[in-house]
Image: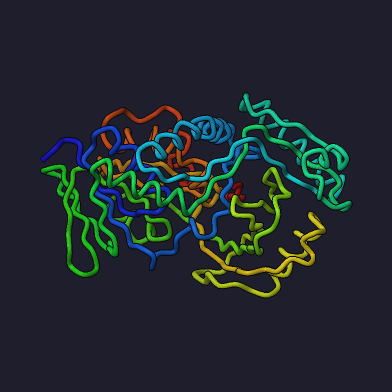
Amino acid sequence: MSLKQLTVVGGGLVGAAIAYGAARRGVSVRVLDQGDTAFRASRGNFGLVWLSSKGGGMPEYARWTRNAVQQWEGFHQDLLKLTGVNSGLVQKGGFWLGFSDGEVQKRADLLAKIDREAGGVPFQMMDNAELRQYLPDIGPKVVGGSWGAHDGTANPLMLLRALHAGLKMAGADLVTGVDVTQIDHDAANGRFTARSRDGQSWTSNRIVIAAGLGNVDLVDQVGILAPMVKTRGQVLITERLRPFMDYPTNKARQTSEGTVQIGSTSEDVGFDDGTTVDKIGGLARRAVETFPALANVRMVRAWGALRPLSPDGYPIYQESTSCPGAFVVICHSGVTLSAIHANVLGPWMGGLTDAPAEVAKFESKRFLDKNARFTSDH
């Protein structure tokens, strides 16, 4: 058996990026993907490649995200060259928009704190008149906002398609329709066996559990603490419109096809990925307040999706101490962090490099204090 043989449980954006990064560097990779029956977080992703406001309570996360967005262009070009699939990257800056002076000041204070503590996270605050130079269709209720030069967008579904195509072209084995329910560790031989509900099994000497909400049933089997919560995000999309929004915002963004994506909510509703009239109505009202021209536009689709995240909203990157070679990844920002997941986590979890110094802060031991209370920051 190769000393660098990796099984990745989970073929969503997080698992596929890690697997792709390992496979591109010569690791023998197998991805076990549940397929479209899974709670795909990419379905509810707003598609932002976003640095602004990330890491307000953890400067290390701000730096991690900064490094990720700086690597996105090269990551995008590598995928495009290899597969011909365009992940939709447009990275020319983005806006956060606020509706009150207090809200805007709170935003300014947060961004100043992040830039001061993490470094290299520039921003610019603007009033309504300044914002109109970039977003001429914003409404009068928008008091002001912030500009982040590093921010941008990608197409989550096309990114997932590109990663899957890239995996195949890099020689990885992509097995779909697999529901992994058990992981066995043969310590004497340093091997892991992933077993599916239908009786199939696959063996390798390294394994990554990146199955989103499916992580819950697997991490204990390899001795890893990885607490997780889930949120539902509801999203709206309009009919195709003339181009009018040259930059993405936190309230809405116009896609390359001309549709406007409006989002999103963050709800604790268990495993319900449906839609509700009150939340969809709230998103629509906020969008019209932001861009009044949307008032007479037809909405063509609304959907909900479940997103996994840790109790404090920051990633968990953890190797098992009792089962070395087993890793777990829990991450909310699967699009934003895709490049660094491929470029840094892939080689590490694939056995090519030592643990990056940056990931120490993201170990799950921060949750060991049973008296600690966490506020989600994502």
Please provide percent x and percent y for residue 190: 16, 42
Residue 336 or residue 310, whichever sits in front: 336
Residue at the extreme front of the image, as rendered = 242
Q: Given the current orientation, which residue lies at the most extreme bottom position?
A: 277
Q: Residue at x 79, y 34 (%)?
A: 125
Rendered image quadrant of residue 258: bottom right
From what the image shows, is residue 66 above or below residue 337?
above
In-image side of 27 versus 274 (left or right): left
Please say if 26 is above or below 165. above
Residue 196 versus residue 12 in the image, above or below: below
Quadrant (top left, top right, bottom left, bottom right) of the N terminus? top left
Task: Say above or below: 21 vs 221.
Answer: above
Q: Residue at x 61, y 52 (%)?
A: 255
Q: Nearer the viewer, residue 88 or 16?
A: 88
269 vs 178, left or right, is right
Q: Position of residue 374 (x, y in %)?
A: 58, 49
Percent x, y of residue 100: 86, 49
Asked which colour scheme the image uses, the reply is rainbow
Residue at x 78% of width, y 44% of height:
135
Residue 8 in the image, given as x and y percentages of width and height: 29, 49
60 horizontally vs 98: left or right? left
Left or right: 262 in relation to 268:
right
Rendered residue at 23%/43% (across/down): 171
Looking at the rendered structure, the number of numbered marks drawn on it comes to 0
Of residues 325 and 232, which is closer to you in this image?
232
